[in-house]
Amino acid sequence: MKSMIEAQKIQEIVKKSRQVLIVDDIPENLQLLSTILNQNGIEISFATSGKQALELLSYSLPDLILLDVSMPEMDGFEVCKRIKLNENTSHIPVIFLTAKNQSADIIQGFEVGAADYVSKPFNSMELLARVCNHIEFKQSKELIIQKNLQLNELNVTKDKFFSIIAHDLKNPFGAILGLTEILKMDLNEMSKEEIGESISQLNSASKQIYSLLENLLNWAMTQTGKIISNPEKIDLHFLLNDLVKLNSTMVSEKKLVVFNQIKQNTFVFADTEMVKTIFRNLLNNAIKYSHAKGIISFSAKWQRDGFVDIVVADNGIGISEIDQQNLFKIGFSHIKTGTNNEIGTGLGLILCKEFVEKNNGKIIVESELGKGSKFIVSLKEK
């Protein structure tokens, strides 16, 4: 019964494995080991010398290496030593399989980095069990590393979330509280112009909060996988015209000129609400970082691969090369005020990237400090 359980365990492990590299200069040994491993569902590759093994490892990484010690030119100890010194191969478990079974040989094998040491002649089931156990351990270790990376990403996401709540929501709320306090205390003494200016500032701060909360909600939903893309045919001309109208107050305040050069019947196949969010954020950024009387434009270019490149361009303050490299990364801070001291969190661009990728597209930026920026969004035409 116990042997049956062990056999089942081995079969479960080998289903997950990819490849074992056998290094031995004797063809009969290679044939025997290949038969044992292949019969149990393990793929193999082989090398007849240490030099050949190192060459193979330069472009193909196995799950495990079975390595003989006594080989011409370069013995197994030296091969193992070089494998462990190479950061690309150091994680691969090495099992020595050799007739050299003296204590000094075994100790030397472990000193150069071997995971295990099996003496010839060997028992086939014992060798297979050792191979499978080391592969399972390697895969478990890789899974732990992957999970740790995911946890680190979640921590970065959490930190970004709390940073936005603590800093970026506080500022517009502070403005609202301050303005309402002034109105409460001095309303009877204020002129119509002063009241109108205060109301305009309240409206602007409220819009900032609403936009930020909308981005936060959408972003939170993407992190939990609750947003699903429902692609449909979208006429970009009308969608962008509507977005410009919604932002007409901010455009007017800076006396900006917005050109929609995308003609009617320019279609993309994507989720409408996600596309609205993408270009709402890109337009808001263009407005935010444009100088008074600046120019913003939308244009489109068809690509041969069935994608449409939609370009949002401005002649504003531009973005440094260093910031461009990290612009869409959650772990980097891009908090920057606009030309009228508008709040900027960087969250909108991160959300843009996630939504573009959910629609099988891509987004890039081209920018130069002092000359403006171009955000290019590629979406499927059909």
Image (cartoon, rainbow, N blue to C red):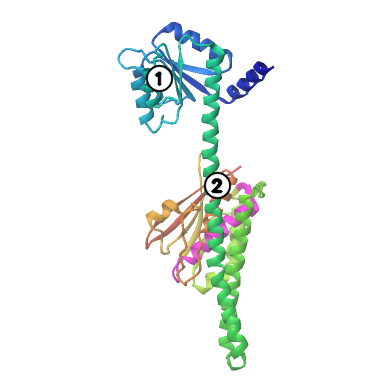
Q: Residue at x 55, y 24 (%)?
A: 133
Q: Residue at x 40, y 15 (%)?
A: 68
Secondary element at tag 1: helix
Residue 279, visible in the rendered structure: yes
Residue bearing mark 2: 151
Amino acid type, residue under disc 2 in the picture:
Leu
Quick one: quadrant of the N terminus?
top right
Q: Earlier in the sequence, mark 2 or mark 1?
A: 1
Q: Residue at x 63, y 58 (%)?
A: 217
- Indicate whether residue 276 is drawn in magenta: yes
Asked if marks 2 and 1 touch (Cβ < 8 Å), the reply is no
Amino acid type, residue under disc 1 in the picture:
Ile
Residue bearing mark 1: 106
| Dot 1 alpha-carbon crowd within 10 angstroms: few under 14, some 14 to 19, many 20 or more | some
Residues shaded magenta? 268-294
- Give the x, y percent position of residue 145: 51, 39
Dominant SS of magenta comes to helix
- Indicate whether residue 263 is drawn in magenta: no
Q: Nearer the viewer, residue 140 or 287?
A: 140
Quadrant of the rendered image containing residue 104 = top left
Q: Nearer the viewer, residue 58 or 96?
A: 96
Residue found at the far top of this picture: 28
- Give the x, y percent position of residue 318: 41, 61
Residue 305, visible in the rendered structure: no
Marker count (numbered)? 2
Asked whether, in this view, residue 76 is left or right of residue 179, the answer is: left
Quadrant of the rendered image containing residue 23 = top left
| Dot 2 alpha-carbon crowd within 10 angstroms: few under 14, some 14 to 19, many 20 or more | few
